[in-house]
C-alpha cells in the first residue's frame, strides 16, 4: 500500500504530540488494543492494567511507554516510516495508547456496510470527570522540566487562571468524549469510567478480560491487582514517567504520578470555573452522555 505523506485532514494536524502520517499509514491488526482517552483520564493507569493483563503480572519492565507505545507521538530518533516499521515488529497482541478522537483513530472507519470484514482494533476508553482532568493536567504541566516544556513548545502558566482559560479553550476533553459517545455500543468499544475503576479495580479488570477474550490465571490476579495499585505505581514512578530519547525524565521528581484521586478539583477550581466546565459539557453533550460521565 502506498504511504500517505499528505494524509486526509481527518487524521488531524501535526504537533509535537501528533503525527497524522503515522495514523494514516498504520496497519491495523484485529488483535490490536488501542487505549484512547482525553489527557489525564487514566491513560497511564490503563497502559499498566493492560500490560499486566497481557503478561500475567510482570514487575521488571523498564518503562511502560516502551511496553505500550503512544501511537501517534512523533519521535526525534525515528522518522515516521521507521516508527511504523518498528510497530510491525511488535508481537501480538499489540497495545497502544492514543489521545485521538474517533475520526482520527485507525481501525474504526475502515469498517462499514461495504467492507464489514476490514480489520478493526479493540478500543478501550477511559473517561474521567472533566473538572478532575483539568486540575490534574495543570499539575502535569507544572511538574514538567523546563527542557520538556521547550521540547513540546509549551510555556509554564503564570497562574492557574491563565492555565484554565487555555484548557477550556483547547477543549481536548470535550472533543474526545463528544466524538466517541455515538460509538459507545460498538462491538469493538469498551468504555470505562475512571471513578468506577478507582472504586472497583477488580471489577474493571473482569470487564476488560471479558471484552478482549483474554484469560488470567487465578494465581496471577493478586499480582496484577498489586502492580496496578496507585501505591505500587507511585513507589516506582520511574517506570511510568515520560522520558526524552536520551532517557532523561521530562518531569521533576515525584511529579508524574501525583494522587490518582477523584474529586480533587475542589482544591483549585473556583465555583465559577467549575460551572464553566459543566455548562460547556451541557452545551456539547447529550443527556445520556452527561449522566454516564456523572454530570447532572
Image (cartoon, rainbow, N blue to C red):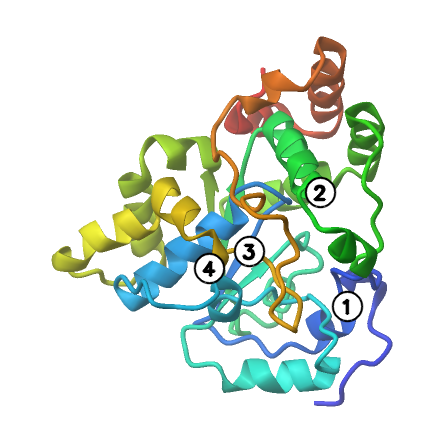
> Considering the numbered disc 2 on the image, is that residue within a helix, a strand or a loop?
helix
Disc number lying in front (1 or 2) = 2
| Residue 202 visible | yes
Q: Alpha carbon of mark 2 to alpha carbon of mark 3: how far?
A: 13 Å
Provide the secondary structure element on which disc 1 rests.
Answer: helix
Question: How far apart in space, not on screen, are marks 1 and 4 (Cα)?
Answer: 28 Å
CB-based contact (under 8 Å), mark 1 and mark 2: no
Residue 139 on image: x %, y %: 65, 36
- N-term mark: 2 or 3: 2
Q: Residues within 10 Å of mark 1 (few under 14, many from 20)?
A: many
Lateral position of residue 65 relative to residue 180, left or right: left
Q: Which residue is mark 1?
A: 20
Q: Which mark is residue 239?
A: 4
Query: Residues at badges 3 and 4 in contact (C-beta under 8 Å)?
Result: yes
Q: Are marks 4 and 2 in contact (CB under 8 Å)?
A: no
Residue 141: which disc? 2
Q: Of the residues under marks 1 and 2, which one precedes in the sequence?
A: 1
Distance in Å between CA atoms under marks 1 and 2: 24 Å
Crowdedness near tag 4: few (<14), some (14–19) or many (≥20) residues, C-alpha within 10 Å = some
The residue wearing badge 3 is 241
Q: Looking at the image, is mark 1 or mark 4 earlier in the sequence?
A: 1
**Label 4 to label 2, Cα distance in Å?**
19 Å
The one nearer the camera, 104 or 91, is 91
Q: Residue most toward the bottom?
A: 1
Label 3 element class: loop
Q: Position of residue 26 (x, y in %)?
A: 64, 76
Q: Quadrant of the N terminus?
A: bottom right
From this viewpoint, which residue is outermost toward the top? Answer: 271
Amino acid at each position: 500500500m502506498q504511504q500517505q505523506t499528505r494524509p486526509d485532514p481527518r487524521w488531524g494536524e501535526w504537533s509535537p504530540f501528533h503525527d497524522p502520517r503515522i495514523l494514516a499509514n498504520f496497519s491495523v491488526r484485529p488483535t490490536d488494543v488501542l487505549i484512547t482517552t482525553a489527557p489525564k483520564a487514566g491513560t497511564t493507569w490503563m497502559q499498566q492494567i493492560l500490560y499486566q493483563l497481557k503478561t500475567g503480572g510482570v514487575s521488571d519492565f523498564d518503562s511502560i511507554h516502551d511496553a505500550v507505545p503512544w501511537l501517534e507521538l512523533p519521535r526525534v530518533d525515528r522518522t515516521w516510516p521507521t516508527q511504523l516499521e518498528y510497530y510491525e515488529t511488535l508481537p501480538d497482541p499489540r497495545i497502544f495508547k492514543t489521545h485521538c478522537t474517533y475520526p482520527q483513530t485507525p481501525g474504526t472507519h475502515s469498517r462499514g456496510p461495504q467492507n464489514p470484514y476490514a480489520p478493526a482494533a479493540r478500543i478501550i476508553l477511559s473517561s474521567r470527570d472533566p473538572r478532575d482532568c483539568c486540575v490534574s493536567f495543570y499539575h502535569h504541566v507544572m511538574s514538567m522540566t523546563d527542557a520538556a516544556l521547550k521540547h513540546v513548545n509549551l510555556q509554564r502558566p503564570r497562574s492557574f487562571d491563565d492555565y484554565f482559560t487555555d484548557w477550556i479553550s483547547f477543549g481536548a476533553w470535550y472533543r474526545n468524549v463528544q466524538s466517541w459517545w455515538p460509538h459507545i455500543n460498538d462491538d469493538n468499544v469498551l468504555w470505562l469510567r475512571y471513578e468506577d475503576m478507582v472504586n472497583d479495580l477488580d471489577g474493571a479488570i473482569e470487564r476488560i478480560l471479558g471484552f478482549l477474550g483474554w484469560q488470567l490465571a487465578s494465581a496471577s490476579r493478586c499480582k496484577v491487582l498489586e502492580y496496578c495499585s496507585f501505591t505500587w505505581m507511585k513507589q516506582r514512578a520511574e517506570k511510568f514517567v515520560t522520558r526524552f530519547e536520551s532517557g532523561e525524565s521530562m518531569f521533576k521528581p515525584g511529579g508524574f504520578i501525583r494522587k490518582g484521586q477523584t474529586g480533587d478539583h475542589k482544591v483549585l477550581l473556583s465555583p465559577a470555573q467549575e460551572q464553566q466546565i459543566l455548562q460547556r459539557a451541557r452545551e456539547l453533550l447529550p443527556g445520556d452522555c452527561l449522566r454516564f460521565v456523572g454530570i447532572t
